[in-house]
Amino acid sequence: GEHPGSTSGPGAGGVDPAVRAQTGSRLTTAQGLRLYDTDHSLKAGERGPVLLQDHHLREKITHFDHERIPERVVHARGAAAHGVFRGYGTASKICKAAFLGKDVETPVFVRFSTVLGSRGSADTVRDTRGFATKFYTGQGTFDLVGNNIPVFFIQDAIKFPDVIHAGKPHPDREIPQAQSAHDTFWDFVSLHTEAAHHTIWNMSDRGIPRSFRMMEGFGVHTFRLVDEEGGTTLVKFHWKPKLGVHSMTWEEAQITNGVDPDFHRRDLADAIEAGAFPEWELGIQTFPDTPEQTFQGIDLLDPTKIVPEEWAPVQPIGLMTLTANPSNFFAETEQVAFHPGHLVPGIDITDDPLLAGRLFSYIDTQITRLGGPNFAQLPINRPHAPINDMTRDGMHQTAVHRGVAPYRPNSLDGGCPFLAGAGEGAYVEAPVTVPQSSKVRAAPASFSDHTSHPRRFYLSLSPVEREHVIAAYTFELSKCYEQSIKERQLRVLADIDPELCAGVAAGLGLPAPEPSGPLPEVEPSPALSQLGHTWPTD
Ligand code: HEM
């Protein structure tokens, strides 16, 4: 029944823009005017000048001119998929979040990414990988915005612009990309030893996953779970791939980057299309929520530290299966907006100072990237819970709000929307005690150990994995122009492990420095080795 004269159809506000897009059977302008030709500009005679009055020409080209939006300031290159998360119910004793309940199924959208490369960069570079999951729960959206490396370069969000400026391409030549922005990257991490732990993970095989399907994911920060009675537990989130953890060798990655720079996104899309649905178990390490917020001497608020799995086993709490590819990359993969502050009742934050900065950075950057404050209305970002948020207007508003009283208290429009209590699913912050203290711009003493964790990581690796780490540092540092940066980084490595330092020094043709003091005593953690990796246990 489509007729150019028809004015029937859903009224204002009743049309889902996702459904409305491009459904007509005839080619039209954006205003619905039918076209008889879209291949020729309107001209004064076949060989004459093009006429300014050709609105179709101008509309078509103007829209095209504005097709691109800014890429993400970090994690610009990514690939995503839809799926489902099924709770095991095993977390329900310590977490009241409904989606973790036994056999509760929640739709998810997951975006994997590299961090430093631009949108068109190659997939199999040495870099951290983003692993961001949006759970569309009935209680609101929960985003677990993690990485495939369990620690971060910095302990305080105020340094995020610094670490990213050091890692992004050089400002003068715009080369190179990824971890290999050699002089600036190595300058920063050698001066800034809290980056040593994340860096050694990058230099290991973890820096070059074979497939997104074969990576672990980590929430990195410690989070706080809240049970029905208000009891709290500190946790770290882990995603464990059912296919195991696998990497490429450096040589394989180099060849792959040339032969198929889209290798990881192709691998993910092909696997899903073929019905080989990738799966991850979500697990948690749990720690008592003591006032110190430490576990066996490890400060749980320090995002450069991990707790070895042998000390606090990862307990499975649910299974995620990716079952469908996006149907439109732009609408879904590009426009999705994750935020670590998207929480649901039962999941709360901790005072990790890195997390604190993330809590405003994501929405702030998305206002620029997605053109105003209304990006939660984009189909991929819409919660699957009913919304009544009193926000109004703004750039790219697509809702047609009803009523006159978007404020409270009000006595119009039939009165205010109801407020919910905790028993009705309201988000109530855990009543955590805040230390009484003077204002201070400083890190706690418990953040000052920068060597024992990278040392444990290195000592936990198998011989072949250690060889790869030495080769990676050697290759990357060999690309530095500044000799002093290489020497400074060797001093950082000397404090991690003498064998590591000697191997890299030999590769660079430089003397191996002595450690600056006695090395910390650490036990290896077999779970850190990809070869020693025992998950899944079934
Ligand atoms: C984007 C993870 C630290 C700012 C992302 C993405 C991931 C991620 C996975 C990509 C999301 C997507 O696929 O759209 C992490 C992790 C961190 C961390 C695990 C540390 C534990 C930070 C910090 C800041 C920050 C400290 C700022 C203070 C951003 C920004 C984006 C981003 C601005 C782009 C978001 C967008 O344009 O939508 N991060 N990040 N991140 N991150 Fe982080």
Image (spheres, rainbow, N blue to C red):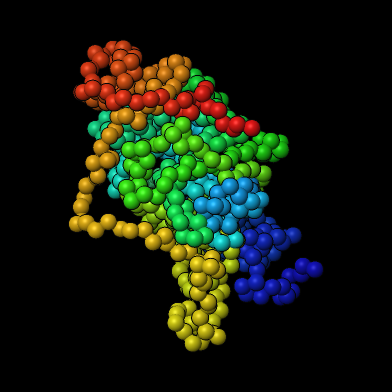
- 247 versus 65 height, above or below: above
Note whether residue 65 is visible.
no
Q: Position of residue 383 (x, y in %)?
A: 57, 60
Q: In which quarter of the image is residue 446?
A: top left
| Of residues 485 and 136, the one drawn nearer to the viewer in this rendering | 136
Residue found 54% across the figure and 56% down from its top: 97
Q: Which of the 4 quarters of the picture holds residue 515? A: top left
Name the quadrant of the N terminus.
Answer: bottom right
Extreme residue toward the right, this view: 1
Q: Is residue 306 visible?
A: yes
Q: Is residue 336 left or right of residue 521?
A: right
Camera-nearest residue between 357 and 238:
238
Q: Is residue 38 above or below residue 198?
A: below
Residue 44, horizontal then vertical, whole percent? 59, 59
> What's the residue at 24%, 58% (across, down)?
436
Residue at the spot 71% in from the left edge and 73% down from the top edge: 9
Single out the residue that lies furthest toward the bottom.
Answer: 411
Viewer-nearest residue: 330 or 530? 530
